[in-house]
Every structure is written in C-alpha cells, then in structure tokens.
Amino acid sequence: MDAIVKMLEKHQPFFEKISRNIYLQAIKDGFLGCMPIVLTSSIFLLIATLPGVVGITLPQPLIDWCNKL
C-alpha cells in the first residue's frame, strides 16, 4: 500500500495538470450531471425485473411503465 501511495505522490504534479484541463473537466461534469438520471432509472429497472426472478408476478402495465422510464 505504501508503494502505491509513494507512486501517486511522485506523479501528483502530472495528475494536477491533467485535472486542470478544461476539456477533461467538461467530460467529468457531463458524467456527474447524468449520474442521478442513471441511478434513478436503474431503480425502476430493478422494480420491473427483480420480482420475476423471485417468482412474484407484477401486472404487465406496471412492468411496461417501469421499463419506459
């Protein structure tokens, strides 16, 4: 573990230079903006598919609605 920390500390100026790049900051901000949508939609996919694995049958309109989201 100490070897990894030492390597990261040795390359820290390079990593800081990369983190100040405006293009990489824009990509990072785009991913951070999309993350709540991805997490929310994954909850609805779990609601639609997980009961079928356990053996519970949900009404088809509910499954269709969850899949659309």
Image (cartoon, rainbow, N blue to C red):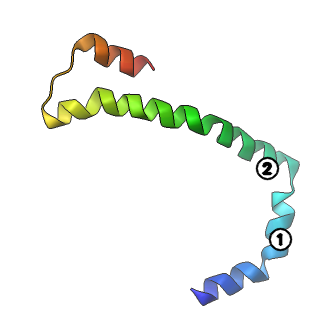
Query: Measuring 79% from the left and 42% from the top, which residue is drawn there?
Result: 26
Q: Is disc 1 surrounded by few (<14), some (14 to 19) or many (20+) residues within 10 Å?
A: few
Precedes in sequence: disc 1 or disc 2: 1
Q: Quadrant of residue 62?
A: top left
45 relative to 27, above or below: above
Q: Amino acid at mark 1?
A: Phe
Q: Secondary structure at mark 1?
A: helix
60 relative to 36, above or below: above
Q: Is residue 46 left or right of residue 57?
A: right
Q: Is residue 68 left or right of residue 17?
A: left
Q: Is residue 63 left or right of residue 3?
A: left
Q: Is disc 2 surrounded by few (<14), some (14 to 19) or many (20+) residues within 10 Å?
A: few
Q: Secondary structure at mark 2?
A: helix
What residue did someone put label 1 on?
14
In the drawing, what numbered circle is on residue 46? none
Total labels drawn: 2
Query: Measuring 57% from the left and 36% from the top, which residue is drawn there?
Result: 36
Q: Is residue 53 left or right of residue 2?
A: left
In the drawing, what numbered circle is on residue 24? 2
Picture coordinates of residue 30, whole percent (x, y): 71, 38
Which residue sits furthest bottom?
2
Q: Nearer the viewer, residue 47 or 16?
A: 47
Query: Measuring 34% from the left and 34% from the top, which residue is drawn there?
Result: 46
